[in-house]
Image (cartoon, rainbow, N blue to C red):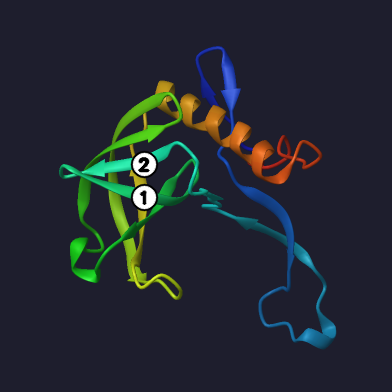
Amino acid sequence: MTKKESGTEEIAPWELTGLPVAPAGATPANTDLQKIIRKNYREPILDDDPVCAEIDGRTHRVCDIGSRGLGLLVPALGGFLAGTLYDITLHVGDNTIVLRGKVTHISPSETSGECHCGIEFIDLDKKDEQALQHFLSAHHAKIFGETSRSADLGRD
């Protein structure tokens, strides 16, 4: 397991691990399943969740969020360019997190007519990382129920 240290307590990136995948070059008939690590897992954000992002004076709906980035719904493809850095004010529950983010992709949404914009967090400080991790854990339990194994998620 990989853990990041922050002061006196340890936190781990919010990731799903331990999912099966076929080895490179395997065919479906002769696969021996191996461990896969899904980096960048993001929690879906519901319409009533208290999460939004301000970028360049405009507020955008966050459609999913994780410890390493977020997804926004934006009105058009031209609004953001892949590779561009932005200053972002992220409102997550009662916390406001000011950070830098890099657009990793932008693509048309299959359902809404809007576009999905993926942003990777750059240099999130420890205090803000802990606030985000706390929100993600509580949010996961809210969405998937107390019986889900949210404590196991995010551990390598």
Residue that appears at 43% across and 24% down: 94
User: Which badge, 2 or 1, comes first in the chain's sequence?
Assistant: 2
Residue that appears at 73% across and 82% down: 26
The residue to which callout 2 is attached is: 52
Residue that appears at 24% across and 68% down: 76
Residue that appears at 50% across and 14% down: 7
**Eyeballing the image, is 113 above or below 58?**
below
**Eyeballing the image, is 18 above or below 67?**
below
Circle 1: element type: strand
**Labels 2 and 1 touching (C-beta < 8 A):** yes
Local crowd at mark 1 within 10 Å, few (<14), some, or many (≥20)? some
Who is closer to the viewer here, 12 or 135? 135
Q: The N terminus appears in which quarter of the rendering? A: top right
In the drawing, does residue 45 fall left or right of residue 57? right
Residue 5 percent location from the top left of the image: 53, 23
Who is closer to the viewer here, 11 or 96? 96
Q: What is the C-alpha distance between the residues marked 2 and 1?
A: 5 Å
In the drawing, does residue 33 fall left or right of residue 143? right
Dot 2 amino acid type:
Cys
Circle 2: element type: strand
Who is closer to the viewer here, 89 or 60? 60
Residue 80 picture quarter? bottom left
**Eyeballing the image, is 53 above or below 7?**
below
Dot 1 amino acid type:
Arg
The residue to which callout 1 is attached is: 61
Local crowd at mark 2 within 10 Å, few (<14), some, or many (≥20)? some
Residue 32 percent location from the top left of the image: 82, 73
Q: From where the camera sits, is residue 90 visible? A: yes
Residue 115 picture quarter? bottom left
